């Protein structure tokens, strides 16, 4: 009798279509030179991403005057990409800092909430939105972790991802057959925000299909935009561009995987609550996940954890939750074994670490402590 999976009787067949290790895996014996493998595998990743043109380094302008809040200098920013509405962002750094500091691109989560973006992991005033208070309580131990990291001695940039907050789809721009009775005025209330988020979740498959028809992919779009944010962070005089990292939970962990694997300027990374294998997505858990994850054809070249492994020998930390409802524990553990093998073969075993915490999907205070210590170890040395 076939085991239960997303494809029923076809599951075992589908899982067997891809070689293990796949073609561009560093675990394969034909790949012996780390630099040669990394160059070839990154090129193949870029081919599969099919990134759209997102312009050069963005020219950010203030959304309002910088101010101080709880020991931080806060700069609300925005920049215009070649397409779509302006991207909103916030830059956080210690108010008294005078020398260049390490920088971190802090990548916000998905969380089924597309009305908000950078606000999910920041606190820039005494009266945050109630939905953001509850969001941080649920996923982050009540902490605005981007602020906490900045206070530790980092310049932290948080920007809205494609389809979130300032980059979200506006009902006025959509045909009635798609938006139904959703109106632009709806999101001004808590009920309206919930209505928008429900609509946005149901709209994802249409976005993915449309992007495929445009010759690109959803990860291709958000990686292009995240790289423009990285351009901006590295351009700031307060930042030591040789000491830059990235971090995020869930959808932010997904973006961490792709940005770290793709861009060598990321010297240190922490992926939280977003590490498993393509097999887990295929057989067990695709119904729990966003369309933002998938790139046609990539599983033939690299398993999902090996995208992050493209950073080797640069240090990467993976933080998992044992009862994470988005993944199965055996495949999270298998992903750990894959990354361990990649880093051992790269002669950089000490530069990779995975930790497993009790509890459901989250980036709580204990996990934040480990992540921040990881950045201190590798970016402040």
Image (cartoon, grey):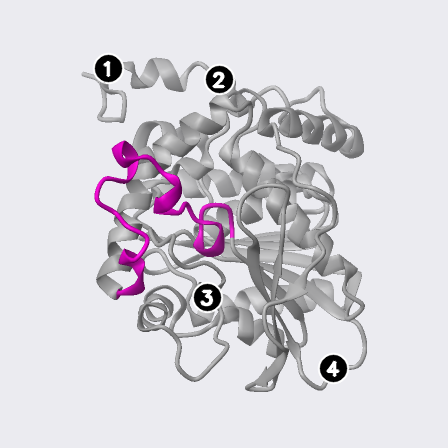
**Which circle's residue, 1 or 3, is located before the other in the chain?**
1
**What residue does disc 2 label?**
18
Which label is found at residue 97?
4
Looking at the picture, how far across and down is residue 125, in whole percent?
Answer: 47, 81
Looking at the picture, how far across and down is residue 78, in whole percent?
Answer: 60, 60
Q: Callout 1: few (<14), some (14-19), or many (20+) C-alpha neighbours within 10 Å? A: few
In the depicted view, which residue is nearer to us: 86 or 22? Answer: 86
**What residue does disc 1 label?**
9
For the residues marked 1 and 3, what is the alpha-carbon distance in whole angstroms?
44 Å
Look at the image and say whether residue 207 sits in the magenta stretch. no
**Which circle's residue, 2 or 4, is located before the other in the chain?**
2
Looking at the picture, how far across and down is residue 238, in whole percent?
Answer: 77, 71
For the residues marked 2 and 1, what is the alpha-carbon distance in whole angstroms?
17 Å
In the depicted view, which residue is nearer to us: 335 or 364? Answer: 364
Quadrant location, the N terminus? top left
Provide the secondary structure element on which disc 3 rests: helix
Provide the secondary structure element on which disc 2 rests: loop
For the residues marked 3 and 4, what is the alpha-carbon distance in whole angstroms?
23 Å
Q: Callout 4: few (<14), some (14-19), or many (20+) C-alpha neighbours within 10 Å? A: some
Q: Residue 255, relative to residue 212: is it above or below?
A: below
Q: Callout 2: few (<14), some (14-19), or many (20+) C-alpha neighbours within 10 Å? A: some
- 2 vs 4, front mark: 4
**What residue does disc 3 label?**
119
CB atoms at circles 2 and 1 under 8 Å apart? Answer: no
């Amino acid at each position: 009798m076939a085991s239960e999976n997303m494809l029923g009787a076809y599951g075992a067949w589908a899982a067997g279509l891809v070689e293990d290790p796949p073609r561009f895996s560093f675990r394969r014996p034909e790949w012996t030179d780390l630099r040669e493998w990394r160059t070839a595998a990154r090129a193949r990743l870029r081919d599969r991403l099919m990134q759209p043109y997102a312009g050069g380094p963005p020219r950010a302008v203030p959304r309002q005057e910088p101010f101080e809040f709880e020991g931080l200098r806060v700069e609300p920013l925005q920049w215009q990409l070649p397409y779509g509405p302006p991207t909103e962002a916030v830059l956080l750094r210690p108010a008294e800092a005078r020398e260049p500091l390490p920088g971190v691109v802090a990548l916000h989560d998905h969380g089924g909430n597309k009305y908000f973006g950078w606000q999910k992991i920041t606190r820039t005033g005494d009266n945050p939105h109630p939905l953001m208070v509850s969001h941080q309580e649920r996923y982050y131990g009540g902490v605005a972790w981007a602020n906490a990291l900045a206070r530790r001695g980092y310049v932290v940039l948080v920007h809205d991802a494609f389809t979130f907050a300032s980059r979200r789809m506006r009902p006025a721009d959509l045909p009635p057959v798609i938006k139904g009775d959703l109106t632009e005025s709806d999101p001004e209330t808590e009920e309206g925000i919930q209505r928008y988020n429900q609509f946005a979740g149901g709209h994802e498959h249409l976005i993915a299909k449309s992007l495929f028809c445009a010759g690109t992919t959803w990860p291709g779009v958000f990686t292009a935009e995240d790289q423009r944010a990285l351009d901006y962070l590295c351009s700031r005089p307060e930042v030591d561009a040789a000491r830059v990292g990235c971090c995020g939970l869930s959808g932010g962990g997904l973006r961490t995987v792709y940005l770290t694997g793709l861009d060598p300027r990321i010297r240190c990374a922490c992926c939280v609550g977003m590490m498993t294998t393509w097999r887990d997505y295929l057989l067990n858990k695709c119904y729990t996940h966003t369309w933002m994850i998938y790139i046609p054809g990539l599983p033939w070249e690299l398993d999902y954890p090996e995208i992050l492994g493209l950073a080797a020998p640069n240090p990467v930390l993976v933080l998992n939750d044992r009862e994470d409802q988005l993944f199965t524990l055996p495949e999270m553990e298998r992903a750990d074994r894959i990354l361990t093998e990649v880093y051992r073969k790269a002669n950089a075993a000490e530069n990779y670490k995975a930790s497993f915490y009790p509890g459901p999907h989250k980036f709580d205070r204990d996990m934040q402590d480990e992540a921040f210590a990881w950045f201190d170890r590798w970016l402040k040395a």
